[in-house]
Image (cartoon, rainbow, N blue to C red):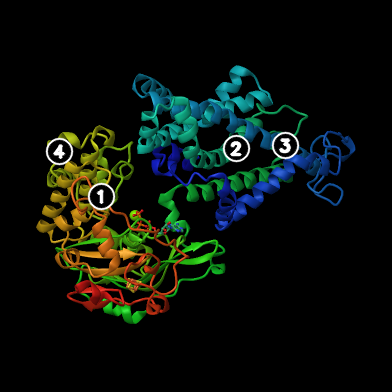
């Protein structure tokens, strides 16, 4: 139960926006359960138990109700595998027949808890205010009673029979469902798309049915499975006390209760129903744990490290030691060498980053630009050591952060590297903050991770961080929740969290594209100031060449997973040599031929991963190629031309 209460108390809101699996991913979910040893064992046992519940009465070799006083209390034998009870009934047959009632009570109890608890939790999150306060206090009071005492009270009031046991164990589990549903709903309601949906006039019922329920279903499924085990045990406890299913109907808890008087002289009477009960609880717990790992991103990384069938998958090639050593010696804050990455898809490994070299020196900002889908975020995640190895493989090359190789590290070393050296800011500040925790709590978590600061020192550091990002009245703001801040303020808080451990490298993936132009400027000016003060290296992913010109020192232009041109901003943007950079510059706002002129777009579409054309990948859209056979024959390697790196066979033509 502690696991379940754990979920209720701190129901991880991130889990809510889990990959709430759409239907076509059902098989993927099954695979992901089976890929974990506990999932495979749990699911197999659960399926066996369900089959037992369905077919148990048919499989029973003898009449489970027939008494035979000539055969009472017989030990296990060939005729009676589990022996006979005090009335001469075959225990094996009673265990098989009792499976249906036992598991039925578990299912019924969870259903009662789900149907009452989930709507209450959603209502509390939706309405907030006094409704939430009253509901949550009532639930806290219920949670303060031990389960079995509460269930006993309910059965004592309603009377002892199977139906009332279902109601009792269900009511006992309501608080856990309600608290979890509230917590995960709160986090979903804070998502920008909910606001968007409300702005479009969607009714509350529609928002809940369309957005909230599908998103929290993964968490609730996990919780149901975990609760099933505890419900089963509570119901059996009632059965054992004689308050459950009434004789002569077999139910494992009741059978245990009946065997109480014979526990010393005939222990097998209790052993077999007890064993079936214990293993069933274990099975559901294992399955619930496996689901928890799938739906809770915080436990996912550990769990995915060694999936049961991992050896069947293609292993990424180990990074070349020569290059890794090179990285160690590198003085750059960020150093990426010959990096190749590929997404694991049903069609095999599909190249997404193809031989990228990058370096960012301390105190400098490198802007990474390129059309949507060119691989910018994938590259940034890899540099931030955030690439999920189950989704994407680093097949070649090396990444160095502050002179330390970021590849091939143990989980602990990786966490340390991330904490000490890397800060990350994503586009969507709203979803980067936990809606149910105060800003102070979130900052404190970031500050105190891996440090031995006392509470007051942590608080002072949080205040200093908020001051750093120009948030006025920081002491008061610490007690506020993310929803009480505007978008720009939230992004400042996200930046403060990213800076909490004084990183050497700040990775920012379109950090301002969700903000209006004025706020955009403020945030970037702020980043620039903080960078100058701390000497950080910044990798800024953006689509806005205007921002690049104003805020970056260097620029790397990415196309179809490769850097096609890179160098100092002034050099590259002043006189681009790659036709793609030229086209990007021409399509930037402000680059039109005059006011009122439409923006130019780049003809054609960027290629999808797995469908890159042979030769130069830009060839189908390139105005410079003019059918030159060289462009179709080989992919140009980056080379130095006029003070920058450029990957075009005819780059010099840009100079003329
Ligand atoms: N998990 C995945 N499996 C397969 N392909 C993926 C996966 N995630 C992203 N992709 C594909 O990889 C390519 C690169 O994606 P990425 O998000 O890195 O692009 P991006 O340059 O950041 O684009 P944007 O500017 O839109 O953010 C895209 O074509 C995308 O569709
Ligand atoms: S190599 Fe050829 S196709 Fe590629 S960018 Fe240069 S001119 Fe265009
Ligand atoms: Mg991106």
The reply to whether discs 2 and 1 touch (Cβ–Cβ < 8 Å) is no
Give the quadrant of residue 129: top left
Looking at the image, residue 12 lies above or below residue 507:
above
Write down the residue under mark 4. 474
Residue at position x 56%, y 41% in the image: 225
Numbered disc in front, either 1 or 4:
1
Q: Earlier in the sequence, mark 2 or mark 1?
A: 2
Give the CA separation, mark 1 to mark 4.
Answer: 22 Å
Residue 191 seen in render:
no
Which SS class for mark 2?
Answer: helix
Q: Secondary structure at mark 3?
A: helix
Residue 212 is labelled as none
Q: Which mark is residue 511?
A: 1
- Mark 3 vs mark 4, foreground winner is 4
Q: Is mark 2 within 8 Å of ligand 1?
A: no
Asked if residue 655 can be seen in this view, the reply is yes
Q: What residue is disc 2 on?
A: 233
The residue indicated by pointer 3 is: 100
Tell me the element at label 1: loop
Q: Percent position (x, y) of residue 380?
A: 31, 60
Distance from the alpha carbon under mark 3 to that under mark 1? 56 Å
- Could you tell which of marks 4 and 2 lies nearer the N-terminus? 2
Query: For the point 27% across and 54% down, which residue is it?
Result: 543
């Amino acid at each position: 139960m502690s696991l379940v209460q754990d979920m209720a108390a701190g129901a991880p809101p991130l889990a809510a926006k889990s990959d709430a699996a759409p239907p076509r991913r059902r098989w993927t979910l099954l695979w992901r359960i089976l890929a974990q040893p506990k999932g495979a064992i749990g699911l197999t046992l659960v399926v066996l138990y369900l089959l037992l519940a369905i077919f148990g009465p048919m499989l029973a070799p003898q009449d489970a109700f027939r008494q035979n006083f000539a055969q009472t209390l017989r030990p296990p034998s060939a005729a009676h595998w589990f022996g006979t009870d005090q009335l001469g009934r075959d225990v094996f047959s009673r265990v098989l027949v009792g499976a249906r009632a036992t598991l039925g009570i578990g299912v019924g109890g969870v259903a009662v808890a789900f149907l009452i608890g989930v709507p209450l939790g959603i209502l509390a999150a939706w309405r907030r205010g006094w409704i939430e306060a009253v509901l949550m206090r009532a639930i806290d009071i219920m949670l303060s009673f031990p389960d079995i005492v509460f269930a006993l009270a309910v059965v004592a009031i309603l009377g002892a029979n199977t139906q009332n046991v279902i109601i009792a164990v269900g009511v006992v589990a309501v608080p856990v469902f309600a608290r979890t549903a509230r917590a995960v709903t709160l986090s979903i309601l804070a998502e920008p798309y909910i606001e968007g949906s409300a702005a479009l006039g969607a009714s509350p019922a529609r928002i809940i049915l369309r957005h909230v329920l599908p998103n929290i279903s993964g968490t609730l499924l996990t919780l149901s499975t975990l609760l099933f085990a505890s419900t089963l045990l509570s119901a059996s406890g009632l059965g054992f006390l004689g308050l459950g299913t009434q004789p002569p109907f077999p139910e494992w808890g009741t059978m245990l209760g009946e065997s109480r008087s014979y526990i010393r002289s005939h222990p097998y009477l209790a052993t077999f129903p007890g064993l079936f009960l214990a293993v069933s609880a274990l099975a559901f717990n294992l399955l619930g744990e496996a689901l928890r790992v799938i739906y809770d991103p915080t436990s996912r990384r550990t769990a995915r490290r060694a999936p049961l069938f991992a050896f069947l998958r293609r292993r990424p090639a180990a990074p070349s030691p020569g290059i890794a050593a090179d990285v160690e010696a590198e003085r750059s804050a960020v150093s990426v060498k010959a990096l190749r990455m590929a997404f694991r898809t049903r069609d095999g490994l599909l190249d997404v980053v193809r031989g990228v070299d990058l370096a960012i020196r301390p105190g400098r900002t490198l802007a990474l630009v390129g059309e949507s889908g060119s691989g910018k975020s994938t590259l940034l995640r890899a540099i931030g050591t955030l690439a999920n190895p189950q989704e994407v493989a680093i097949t070649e090359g090396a990444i160095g952060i502050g002179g330390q190789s970021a590849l091939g590290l143990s989980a602990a070393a990786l966490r340390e590297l991330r904490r000490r050296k890397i800060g990350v800011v994503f586009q969507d500040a709203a979803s980067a903050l936990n809606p149910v925790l105060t800003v102070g709590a979130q900052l404190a978590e970031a500050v105190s991770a891996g440090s031995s600061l006392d509470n007051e020192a942590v608080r002072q550091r949080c205040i200093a961080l908020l001051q750093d990002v120009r948030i006025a009245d920081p002491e008061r703001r610490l007690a506020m929740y993310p929803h009480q801040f505007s978008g720009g303020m939230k992004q400042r808080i996200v930046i403060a969290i990213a800076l909490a451990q004084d990183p050497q490298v700040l990775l920012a993936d379109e950090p301002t594209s969700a903000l209006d132009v004025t706020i955009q400027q403020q945030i970037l000016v702020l980043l620039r100031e903080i960078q100058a003060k701390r000497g950080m290296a910044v990798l800024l992913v953006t689509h806005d060449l205007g921002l690049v010109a104003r805020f970056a020192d260097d620029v790397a232009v990415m196309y179809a997973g490769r850097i096609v041109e890179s160098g100092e901003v002034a050099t590259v943007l002043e006189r681009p040599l790659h036709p793609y950079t030229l086209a990007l510059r021409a399509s930037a706002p402000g680059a039109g031929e005059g006011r009122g002129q439409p923006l130019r777009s780049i003809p054609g579409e960027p290629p999808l991963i797995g469908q890159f054309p042979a030769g130069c990948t830009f060839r189908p859209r390139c105005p410079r190629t003019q059918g030159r056979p060289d462009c179709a024959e080989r992919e140009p390697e980056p080379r130095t031309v006029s003070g920058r790196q450029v990957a075009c066979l005819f780059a010099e033509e840009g100079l003329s």
